Amino acid sequence: MLASALHAWRWLIKHPDFIPYQNPEGVRTGQYGDQSDTDERFWAACELYAATGEQEYLSAAEALFSEELSLTQFGWANVAGLGALCCLTDLKGSVLFDRVKQAFLSQSEQALSLARRSGYGTALSEDRYIWGSILPIMSNALAMIVSERLTGREEMLEAALNQWDYALGLNALDLCFVTGFGEKTVLHPHHRPSGADGIDAPVPGLISGGPNQRFPYPATREKLGEDTPPAKYYLDETPSADTNEIAVYWNSIAVLTAACFHMRSKE
């Protein structure tokens, strides 16, 4: 795997121009377009330096880093945060570590501010209940967990726990977004294996994307109308990919968040 990663890096060096991906003609599924590959290159450089210790990759990571990179969101479009986690874990003592730490703490402070302004302690503004709204909530949880690890600020950990509580049912819907867990939980996720296995209950341990008032399907808007609050804009129905989809990238961050609290309980 390391040999493949080094080969890929050499290819990137030879091809510095960013060419955005576009679906082939006739393909209308999610394109997952991007505006830049700087975050991907930064993440790759951090990981290669951690794996090899060679100055070339540290220098590349330093050149690619900017305080403008999103370091506390961990989705498919923003992967600089994964580079930041690598840096904060494996690059201690470097100048880059200090720069990333300062920017990361500043951005995680924004997550804490969001949580404090919410009646449910949720680190999400009203206009961010988008497709997969669970992702920014879990991302902000992890950001605050890491911030507490770096600073010892208990308020960060308490706010992060509120995000996990949100996922488990402390939300405006009074619903656990993790399948197979709790008394009132998601029963009909947009998850085709669960819908096709002949078992009434969905596969357990999967987290739903959650409320989405920004980009709902017309059928969802027809059922919920215009007056439903953002945090309640959700349907527990299998066809509702817009509110009830299962996706690996927000499940991954939820698993990591849960693991952090589990490990913390053992300390």
Image (tube, rainbow, N blue to C red):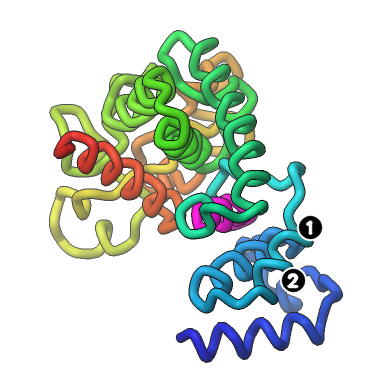
Viewer-closest of 87 and 110: 87
Quadrant of the rendered image containing residue 111: top right
Q: Position of residue 186 (x, y in %)?
A: 27, 38
Q: Residue furthest right?
A: 17
Disc 2 crowd rating (10 Å Cα; few below 14, some 14-19, many 20+) is: few
Residue type at numbered disc 2: Tyr
Viewer-closest of 106 and 113: 106
What is the span of residues highlighted in magenta in the rendered image? 75-87
Element on which disc 2 rests: loop
- Look at the image and say whether residue 246 sits in the magenta stretch: no
Q: In the rendered view, does 57 fall on the left or right side of 119?
A: right
Residue type at numbered disc 1: Gln
Identity of the residue drawn at 53% across and 58% down: 91
Numbered circle sitting on residue 67: none
Q: For the C terminus, give its image quadrant.
A: top left
Numbered circle sitting on residue 35: 1
Element on which disc 1 rests: loop
For residue 234, say whether it is visible: no
Q: Position of residue 22 (x, y in %)?
A: 75, 71
Q: Residue furthest front?
A: 93
Quadrant of the rendered image containing residue 61: bottom right
Q: For the N terminus, give its image quadrant.
A: bottom left
For residue 198, say whether it is visible: yes
Identity of the residue drawn at 31% across and 20% down: 170
- CA gap between label 2 and label 1 equals 10 Å
Q: In the rendered view, does 14 fall on the left or right side of 45?
A: right
Residue with the mark numbered 2: 21
